Image: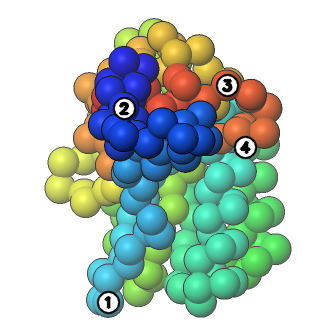
């Protein structure tokens, strides 16, 4: 907050008239400049982009995979395939298969890292492969280790950490630290924005990650 105020002060020097309004606009600009957004998922010709959504339980990974697949397949006309690694939740894999069937996409359920490697090999003709993983508690060492072992080092995977906007700031920090230790995080996806009225924790997480 102190850093933001200093930047606003610099921008508002010598502008005493209408200062309140100008300070508010300056703060908006400073906030926007501080947050870098990744933009659309970039696909390349001849090689599928593999994106795995990881994160705690209940943050909306499966729904996010469904939304992304519909966007890229139906609106962007990309060749998309879905993979589910979530065999923990009852009917989770079936839910993703239903999404895939509705929009005409191939989908597979994998039970091991070896299975995943084989499925990704069969999807070499796709532009984008989206992987839905099981929710993991950042405090469960065994679950985190299992996630780490699922992805072999010779696979090129873009890991996106999915977190809920309703998560407490201290927990956001803890989730990010624990999952970063397991996989190199390419970006953050925030869900449930409509369920929160305070977003300072998101801002702090983005600018310190």
Question: In the visual, does 94 lie left or right of 209?
Answer: right
Question: In the visual, does 35 lie left or right of 78?
Answer: left
Q: Which numbered disc flags the more N-terminal residue, 1 or 4?
A: 1
Q: Which numbered disc flags the more N-terminal residue, 2 or 4?
A: 2
Residue 68 point in image, percent of width and height: 61, 64
Is residue 46 shown above or below 5? below
Circle 4 sits on which residue? 92
Pair 2/3: label in front: 2
Pair 2/4: label in front: 2
Mark 4–mark 3 distance (CA, rounded to whole Å)? 30 Å
Tell me the crowding category of disc 2: few under 14, some 14 to 19, or many 20 or more residues within 10 angstroms, Cα based.
some
The answer to whether marks 3 and 1 mark residues whose Cβ atoms lie closer than 8 Å is no
The one of 79 and 67 positioned closer to us in this rendering: 67
Pair 3/1: label in front: 3
Circle 3 sits on which residue? 198
Q: Quadrant of residue 42?
A: bottom left
Mark 2–mark 4 distance (CA, rounded to whole Å)? 50 Å
Tell me the crowding category of disc 1: few under 14, some 14 to 19, or many 20 or more residues within 10 angstroms, Cα based.
few
Pair 1/4: label in front: 1
Query: Dot 3 lies on which element?
Result: loop
Query: Dot 2 lies on which element?
Result: helix
Query: Dot 1 lies on which element?
Result: loop
Mark 3–mark 1 distance (CA, rounded to whole Å)? 41 Å
**Residue 45 marker:** 1
Mark 1–mark 4 distance (CA, rounded to whole Å)? 31 Å
Residue 131 point in image, percent of width and height: 51, 55
Q: Quadrant of the N terminus?
A: top left
**Residue 9 marker:** 2
Residue 158 seen: yes
């Amino acid at each position: 907050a102190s850093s933001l105020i200093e930047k606003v002060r610099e921008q508002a020097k010598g502008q005493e008239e209408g200062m309140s309004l100008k300070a508010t606009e300056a703060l908006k600009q400073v906030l926007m400049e501080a947050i870098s957004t990744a933009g659309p998922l970039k696909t390349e010709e001849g090689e599928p982009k593999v994106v795995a959504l990881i994160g705690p339980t209940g943050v909306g990974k499966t729904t996010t995979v469904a939304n992304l697949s519909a966007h890229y397949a139906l609106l962007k006309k990309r060749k998309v395939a879905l993979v589910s690694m979530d065999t923990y939740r009852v009917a989770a894999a079936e839910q993703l298969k239903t999404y895939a069937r509705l929009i005409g996409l191939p989908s597979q359920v994998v039970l091991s890292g070896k299975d995943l490697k084989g499925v990704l090999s069969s999807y070499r003709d796709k532009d984008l492969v989206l992987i839905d993983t099981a929710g993991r508690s950042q405090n469960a060492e065994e679950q985190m280790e299992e996630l780490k072992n699922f992805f072999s080092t010779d696979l090129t995977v873009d890991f996106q950490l999915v977190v809920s906007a309703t998560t407490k700031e201290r927990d956001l920090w803890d989730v990010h630290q624990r999952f970063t230790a397991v996989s190199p995080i390419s970006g953050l996806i925030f869900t449930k924005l409509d369920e929160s009225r305070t977003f300072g924790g998101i801002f702090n997480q983005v600018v310190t990650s």
